[in-house]
Amino acid sequence: MNAIKNDTIIALATSSGVGAIAVIRLSGEKSIEIVNKHFKSKFGNKDLNNVKSHTIHLGNIIDNKRIIDEVLISVFKNPNSYTGENVVEINCHGSVYIQQEIIQLFIKSGVRNADAGEFTLRAFLNGKMDLSQAEAVADLIASNSAASHQVALQQMRGGFSSEIEKLRQQLLNFASLIELELDFAEEDVEFADRTEFSNLINQISAVLKQLIDSFALGNVLKNGIPIAIVGEPNVGKSTLLNALLNEEKAIVSHIAGTTRDAIEDEINIEGIAYRFIDTAGIRTTEDYVENIGITKTFSTIEKAQLVLQLIDASNIETLQQNISELEQKYPSKKILTIVNKSDLLSEAQITTLKNTYESLIILSAKNKIGIHKLTTTLTQLVNKGALSNNETIVSNSRHFEALNNAYLSIKEVQKGIENNISTDLFAIDIRQALFHLGEITGEVTTEDLLGNIFANFCIGK
């Protein structure tokens, strides 16, 4: 990441390749002045330097007397722009040739190619957004479901930031009084009411714990919920994956051991992204390659948020044994048991199974019977209450780590208050908590941290 300068940067803001329209963005003190040199208005001799901010102008981009393209120019003057600087957006035709001709024209005029995320980095450094909001921009661009979109949008609007800032400000006010006490240590005076301070610390601890706990939901909403489909060979794992995806993704064969590697694909169900992973059938085999696949199956189960255990309807006599074995092997995993090939069962058998196993799902993946029941069950298993209530949900692992560190520091402060230890000892933990909360919103940053964050952005944003 380059050190931030007062130069003018340029990048393609839309996807690369051919399209109807492309948007080229410039930002910097001289961006309007530079574009104006190569712009000829369709309506008289218009000077972009003198137009109002947030206006659009039709004309041609010219290189000397050669017209490159007819464009629409959008002008945003500082500080009322995305970056807080003068910003110009050029809407041109989507030809790759035209895009590159315009970009190269301005580079020859002294403009620099923007680094990844540099527009948003400038917005952060110019106080247009804090660091957590800037990171939410990248999450919003990458969102692939209604849920991940909602979480990112809420964070970009500052919901998470305002909650952190409120906690930090309350703690900062008391920290100032504690620091004042240290300055007057010889006079043995108290400026901070210990009861009130204790109540505040307990309140902050509870809020931090709630935010930390929300990461379990936020992380899967952002990245998709990983679900492993497991079972013995030929129970219909690949057929179920194909039925869920509504396409022939996995090879289906009557030959046992066809699937020898994990096959993964994603499906969106009621706004939530699920990553289904079809695994190799679990059995004892002498086949070296198949054994590698079975090893991968166990590894996939370890990483999965939910396990779909498929059992062949022709083997229901061993149903309880299969359920017990998997539950004993993975006691902390959420396991959903499915009896497949329901067409092999009589109505009486199906009724008995439903009465015996309350949460059992009976379906026919081949005939796509009972698939809706499965997807409905999956939706019910996801705790969408926090999402529906528009509560703050943490989805960024960096924020999660900082919240954890702040929480540990606050717990140390709580211990200090309970044990009535000297103020100067738990003042250190207060400073640490403030530091970690500041890391989230960007009050505390390093060049390496900013480089790591914005390097993951797409160029042009």
Image (tube, rainbow, N blue to C red):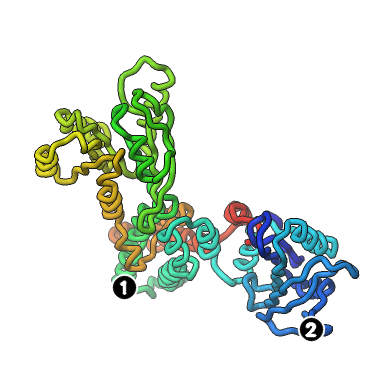
Give the residue pinned by disc 2: 43
Q: Is residue 429 visible?
A: no
* Mark 1 surroundings within 10 Å by alpha-carbon count, few (fewer than 14), some (14 through 19), many (20 or more): few
Evaluate whether residue 335 shows in this view: yes
C-alpha gap between disc 1 and disc 2 = 67 Å
**Residue situated furthest top in the rendering:** 286
Q: Quadrant of residue 17?
A: bottom right
Which residue is drawn at the image coordinates 35% and 37% (left, top)? 239
Q: Is residue 294 left or right of residue 312?
A: right
Q: Looking at the image, is 195 positioned above or below residue 452? A: below
Q: Position of residue 459 (x, y in %)?
A: 65, 57
The secondary structure type at the circle numbered 2 is loop
Residue lying at 19% horizontally and 33% vertically, measured from the top left: 324
Amino acid tagged 1: Glu
Residue at x 41% of width, y 72% of height: 170
Q: Position of residue 112 (x, y in %)?
A: 77, 60
Q: Residues within 10 Å of mark 2 (few under 14, many from 20)?
A: few
Q: Amino acid at mark 2?
A: Phe
Q: Residue at x 70, y 69 (%)?
A: 91
Task: Using residue 152 as the reference point, say whether residue 104 is left or right of it.
Answer: right
Where residue 177 appears, x then y in whole percent?
Answer: 43, 73
The relative height of residue 7 versus residue 400 in the rendered view (above or below) is below
* Number of numbered discs overlaid on the protein picture: 2
- Report which residue position mark 1 lands on: 196
**Which quadrant is the N terminus positioned in?**
bottom right
Residue 286 at x, y = what percent?
36, 14
Judged left or right of residue 372, residue 20 is right
Q: Quadrant of residue 141?
A: bottom right
- Which element carries disc 1, helix, strand or loop? helix
Q: Nearer the viewer, residue 181 or 207?
A: 207
First in sequence: mark 1 vs mark 2? 2
